[in-house]
Image (tube, grey):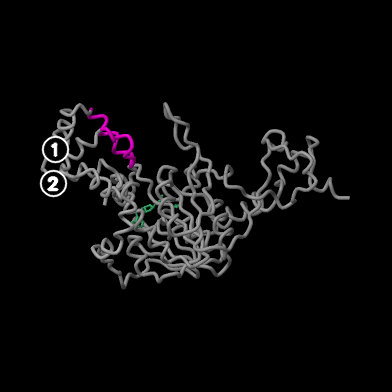
Amino acid sequence: MYYCLYDLLNEKRTEKGETSQEMYRFFQGKKIKKADIVQLKDTCSIGSVKKFLPAIEEYTGMTELEVYLSLGIIPEEYKKSFFDNITSISQMLVPESKERVTGLSPIFSTQFGTLYNADCLDVLSMLPDESVNVVFADPPFNLSKEYDTGIKDDLGMSEYISWSYKWLGECVRILKPGGSMFIYNLPKWGTYYADFLNKYLTFRSWIGVNMKASLPIAGRLYPAHYALLYYVKGGQAYTFNNQRIPAETCRHCGGELHDYGGYKNKMNPSGVNVSDIWSDIYPVRHKKDKNRPFNELSVKMLDRIISMSSNPGDTVFDPFGGSGTTYVVSELLGRNWIGSELGNCKIITDRFANIQRDRDTLSQVQQREKNILFSEPVRILRKKNGFWLPEDFKK
Ligand SMILES: C[S@@+](CC[C@H](N)C(=O)[O-])C[C@H]1O[C@@H](n2cnc3c(N)ncnc32)[C@H](O)[C@@H]1O
């Protein structure tokens, strides 16, 4: 099964024993530039290549319909006949056999959690159906990052998507009815994940986590957010603990950035409701705050996700441990946790050995950046500059 036409062409090229140059030459002979073929590496769209289809059919030896079906697309004009023949089609299909791993031993456990130094698919295969309340996943983004484990972070599009659908499917399986799933990735991958998850879970939000992580790209909008997909299993029964954060204020004068107009006196002194744009999550960039040289999410972000979607005693699963932010925050919040990390788990165990550091960070977040309309330093600044404070409206 392919999602990206380039990967299908590459498969056929390998079958023929040709080099990439030979494949490009074939298409050049059909007046299709090499660049047009190369750009197919980054898309699963077939719309842009409609005019190349005769050449693609000739190169692959497939009919147009076979090309479409290989990409998981049933063209509209075939849908009726597909459904009319659903019984005979279903009888021809056989499921891939899934191997259940048994006997994996945890590398580390705590009062609340268990960590496996293993592939997440193996760990997932051991976990029972509907056994966790929350899944949070921050997978490798397939950006050719060098992880210390030699984990391949530059898969072809089809391979990355089908690997993602495997672990996403397993995460859906282990999620309890009413449980919540959060998946963090680049918006591009978020669109594929959403397409998959929409079939099995109920969409709640596409949270934009504000992050100017890269440089502007010519000819495109400046990418300034990561996607945090938020889904629940089933209909209504899910835990949602509303989270409140401080009003955004000017760091120089303390004045509020949004005009609350006549509603100032009605504002909740515990803060404003979190929206689906999170502009207050800062990347963990400074060496002194980081537990490892690779990407690491902030304690504040995981505190918000876990506090919002679970209660003490619930279980959180994160397939991609990294530096262990999810596990440490779950532990500090009294949630059970299960984790897997294929790479170096010492970073995680060291972090637990030094958990006071994360406890201090969390308590700072909870005191200054949560359930409060203005933090103490902001209150002082506002007072100095004559801005209102919630108590000014009390009779
Ligand atoms: C983006 S990082 C996660 C960072 C983490 N959220 C944090 O805050 O530290 C992804 C991690 O997944 C791990 N990983 C990649 N493939 C894996 C797999 N198949 N099973 C388990 N872990 C994997 C990588 O080694 C990497 O540490």
> Any magenta on residue 45?
yes
**Residue drawn where x is 29% and y is 38% of the image:** 41
| Occupied quadrant, residue 251 | top right
- Disc 1: which residue: 19
Tag 2: amino acid: Glu
Residue at the disc numbered 2:
15
Estimate the x, y position of residue 235 in percent, counting from the top left.
Answer: 54, 63
Of residues 83 and 56, which is closer to you in this image?
83
Looking at the rendered image, the disc whose residue lies closer to the viewer, 2 or 1, is 2
Within 10 Å of disc 2 (Cα), the crowding (few <14, some 14-19, many 20+) is few
Residue 157 falls left or right of residue 264: left
Whole-percent x, y for residue 160 in the image: 32, 49
Stretch of the chain drawn in magenta: 33-51
Main secondary structure type of the part rendered in magenta = helix
**Residue labelled 1 has its Cβ within 8 Å of some atom of ligand 1:** no
Where residue 51 sits in the image (x, y, percent)?
27, 32
Image point (82%, 48%), residue name: 391
Q: Nearer the viewer, residue 135 or 231?
A: 231
Q: Is residue 238 magenta?
A: no
At label 1, which amino acid type do we have? Thr
Q: Which mark identifies residue 70?
A: none
Residue 346 versus residue 4 in the image, above or below: below
In the image, farthest residue toward the right: 395
Q: Residues within 10 Å of mark 1 (few under 14, many from 20)?
A: few
Residue 129 % position (x, y): 41, 70
Q: Assign a secondary structure to mark 1.
A: loop
Q: Residue at x 31, y 39 (%)?
A: 46
Tell whether 194 sits left or right of 278: left
